[in-house]
Amino acid sequence: MEQLSELSAEFKRTNNCGELRAANVGDRVVLNAWVNRRRDHGSLIFLDLRDRSGLVQVVLDPEVNADAHALGHDVRSEYVLAVCGEVVAREGEAINPNLPTGEIEIRCDNMAILNTAQTPPFSITDDTDTDELVRLKYRYIDLRGPKLQRNLRIRHEAAQTVRAFMSGEGFLEIETPMLFRPTPEGARDYLVPSRVSPGNFYALPQSPQLMKQLLMIGGFEKYFQLARCMRDEDLRADRQPEHTQIDIEMSFVDREDIFELTERLYDHMFKQVIDVDLRAPFRRMSYAEAMDQYGTDKPDLRFDLPLVNLTSIVAECEFKVFAGVVASGGVVKAICAPGCADLPRAQMDKLIDFVKEHKAKGLAYFPVTAEGMGGPIAKFFSHDELASIKDATSACEGDMIMIVADETAIANEALDWLRREMAARLDLIDEDAWAPLWVYDFPLFGWNEDEKRWDAEHHPFCMPHPEDWDMLDTDPGKVRALSYDLVLNGIELASGSIRIHRRDIQEKVFSVLGISMEDARDRFGFFLEAFEYGAPPHGGIAPGFDRTIMLMCGEPNIREVIAFPKTQKAQDLMAGAPSTADAVQLRDLHIKLDLPPTGDDV
């Protein structure tokens, strides 16, 4: 089978497949594309040619060109062709109304095979049910499919929109180093050994946190970057070891300025790219309110089902499980599932198992019927207690009140999962809705029970809330940070804060975290010293670009909007990364491996 070794002038592309329309009838065009499908009707052969712009039908007719028709018998899916011919109109039933190019076709008068192809390991379609690991192994084939072509085009358009918007707001795009030193960001660092400094390592940035603050100290005032960030953490559907964030930092601002800028950025980006109005200003909710009403700091507000605190109502009830939890400092909280009073016992047992999977000890429930509130534990409650529970949960006849009694954190987590599970089962989620939310006033510190010390809830450079400074010494757990998250449809899209810009406050926060002054000088000495040379008040935010595109594309998995993603084990199945290093590389890096024995060696 003859193939072109070089693209000659006569076969150089003049048009893209998906751009041809009825207005092009009579034009002679040259297309370079892949074969999406071949249909051999004997006297005529039909080829659907595909490039990133779309599909167009090509007709091989022996009366037009016998050699091209003969060559068409050898063509298969994913062959790469150069096709020359005239654009002609389709007529009557031959018109395909489902295809943008469906009113025309190409009458081929010359054709060349640019490359052959083996049969692909899976069909390149929008609705392929191929195992994801196979798709990742052959990612270069998967990328040809319409879904990934669309998603990565949306990603490109969003990136260009962000750059144009931020530049128009007076921000400078500045690149920061990829080789830096470790900074505490909440995950493990990826380390890079230094060949020229034996025994020392760079850290790949989890975010450009220190660098962007130094840019503010350097007087740039408005900085942004589509920053590549690396975190060695356990992966899930909305996480990758390397991700992109829209990194933003501003001087002489408060958080209201950052809220307002971010809202306008997202309003503009969503409208320009997918024609969605997010309708700023976005709703706002304190961290304490979010945890109390929804059990999570990233509630999905496309549906209701708030959590209701019943602790005070059941504190002295005769049901010992509830009373005992309250006496030990726990909480009793509920959701009201509409129309679920008649759920079969088998379904309730599955829901009990469901909350147990999320650490709760169990699930109590009251079906609300015409006869009153029933269920296996109703006999332990007085009429007034039952009436108070019904009123607190706004339950109506036909509803089911579902209750978890446990430690506050466990009850919140279990009911958050149950709330989302019931919303999905009851079809309460409006898939066309957009519910952006600001959550603010996060705790500055979280207690690490295993190590008996305080950790930074976000990172150690967040400014403590001015109203809480006095508690840094007396009660760090109650100190709020001037930090905030942007949440959209239950997905955390961005975190940010007003930063510490004074050395004394930064050293105080380090002290609460158990970082000694000697250790602080060793790790952050350059940063602390910079505060001594006129650091302005500043703050910023870092929206996750990959998660934003995931929502724009309606994808449940972040891997569907990244060209070359990793698996949940942080592996690149296509390239075989991570891989071993050869002896020479290890020698040059002054590294000697001392790996534990494998199972076969034990």
Image: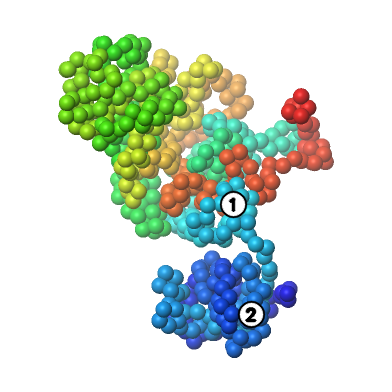
Q: Which mark is residue 346?
A: none
Give the x, y percent position of residue 178: 62, 43
Badge 2 marks a residue whose secondary structure is strand
Give the x, y percent position of residue 316: 25, 11
Q: Residue at 32% x, 22% y: name it.
A: 364
Give the x, y percent position of residue 487: 39, 40
Q: Label 1 vs label 2: CA separation?
A: 31 Å
Marks 1 and 2 close (CB-CB < 8 Å): no
- The image shows residue 178, relative to residue 468, as above or below, that is below
Badge 1 marks a residue whose secondary structure is helix
Q: Amino acid at mark 1?
A: Arg
Q: Residue at 49% x, 46% y: name it.
A: 557
Q: Residue at 61% x, 38% y: name it.
A: 569
- In primary-sequence order, the first of circles 1 and 2 is 2
- The image shows residue 360, relative to residue 458, as above or below, that is above
- Give whichever of 308, 290 is nearer the camera: 308
Q: Residue at 36% x, 58% y: name it.
A: 275
Q: Which mark is residue 111?
A: 2
- Give whichever of 358, 302 is nearer the camera: 358
Label 1 environment density (alpha carbons within 10 Å; few <14, some 14–19, many ≥20):
some
- The image shows residue 510, relative to residue 179, as above or below, that is above
Horizontally, residue 465 falls left or right of residue 564, namely left
Q: Quadrant of the N terminus?
A: bottom right
Q: Which mark is residue 135?
A: 1
Residue 558 visible in the shown view: yes
Horizontally, residue 152 falls left or right of residue 345, namely right
